[in-house]
Image (cartoon, grey):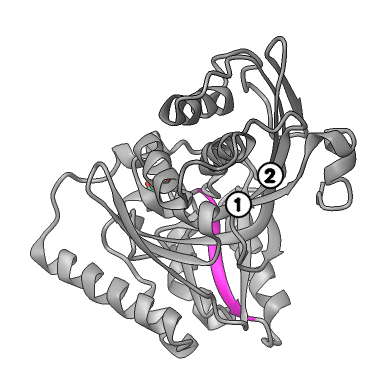
Amino acid sequence: MIKPEGVYVRIPASTANLGPGFDTLGMALSLYAWVGMKEADQTEIRLYGNEMDGIPRDKTNLVYQVAQMVFREAGVHLPELEISMYSDIPLTRGLGSSASAIVGALYAANALIGSPLSDARLLDMATAIEDHPDNVGASLFGGLITAIWDGEHADYVRMEPHDDLEVLVVIPDFQLSTSEARKVLPDNISRKDAVYNISRSSLLVAALSQGRLDLISRAMSDRLHQPYRAELVPGMVEILERAADHGALGVALSGAGPTLLALVDRHSLRKKELESYLLNTMKAEGISASARWLVPDREGARLIGSMSTGSFMQMIEGEVKA
Ligand code: HSE
């Protein structure tokens, strides 16, 4: 049942929270990482691309460790692996790079041994590692994911993103770790703020699932995390308040930040205006940032092929954006 020829998989980036859906609402994005995995005589970890600084090349590597969790769960002994990784997803910027690595490891390891674990089980394992299901759910299933996590099991619903949705991300040139960005959050919130978020998160999910793009702007505001994280991302308060005046359907901190994400109608004639507004607002705060136009990814983690058909980089050539 082990595939001697190995596997390689593609995994999308993701945005979490989407404003009020803190730790619960995620969407996959058309920016990707690739993981190749094959049985080997001796473990070797090959890292390609610019987003790999500081990633270990021995058995402490996250992808190796997560793959071993899959093998343990499936009762398979496979201690030596050849792992190849390439990613276009910027690290610690709020675009789910660690979730994509976790999902890539789970998905590739499971595929390598004939997929004995269900996708639902992979989501539970991914969420147990990541602690919240919004990034990993989106990376695994693609599209929009709303999910709950009880500490052992995630229940989720996947929604198809509206055809007209385009996504502009503005990625600041500084990193912000999720753990740092969680430290600024209060342990308790008022009932008023809880109702504020429940109502908007519910409305946002309903609006996204019914294609009510007109409701997105008002539904995307949040009192659970964005006001506290604003101090970590210069320019964010102004952008959250004003981006809709410059052509955004809605705007939010992407995950724990520092990336800001705007949903845009792909027919909009104001895309350039919006991009300039976001970049200039950050620049005025002394933050240099880069903008990328993306679309929602609809496929999630996907088996692309086997490792026997060519070198890892040859196989993903043409797909990579860098
Ligand atoms: N929901 C998470 C947060 C996403 O906002 O902290 C980051 O991993």
Residue 240 placement, left or right of 92: left
Q: Magenta residues, as a range?
A: 258-265
Q: Please provide percent x and percent y for residue 180.
A: 38, 35
What percent of the width, then of the height, locates residue 185? 26, 45
Was residue 249 drawn as part of the magenta stretch in this picture? no
| In-front residue for pair 204/79 | 79
**Residue placed under numbered mark 1 in the picture:** 301
Q: Residue furthest top?
A: 42
In this image, 272 relative to 161: left or right? Answer: right
What residue do we see at 81% from left, 49% from top?
A: 320
Give, as a three-letter code, the residue at label 1.
Answer: Ala
Q: Relative to 55, is 232 above or below?
A: below
Q: Identity of the amino acid at label 2?
A: Val
Whether 75 is drawn above or below 57: the answer is below
Quarter assignment of residue 25: bottom left
Kindly tell me whether residue 86 is visible in this rendering. no
Q: Which residue is mark 2?
A: 9
Cα gap from disc 2 to disc 1, whole angstroms = 7 Å
Residue at 44% from the left image edge and 79% from the top image edge: 208
Answer whether labels 2 and 1 touch (C-beta < 8 Å): yes
Please state the horizontal and vertical placement of residue 318, each as a whole percent of the image: 88, 52
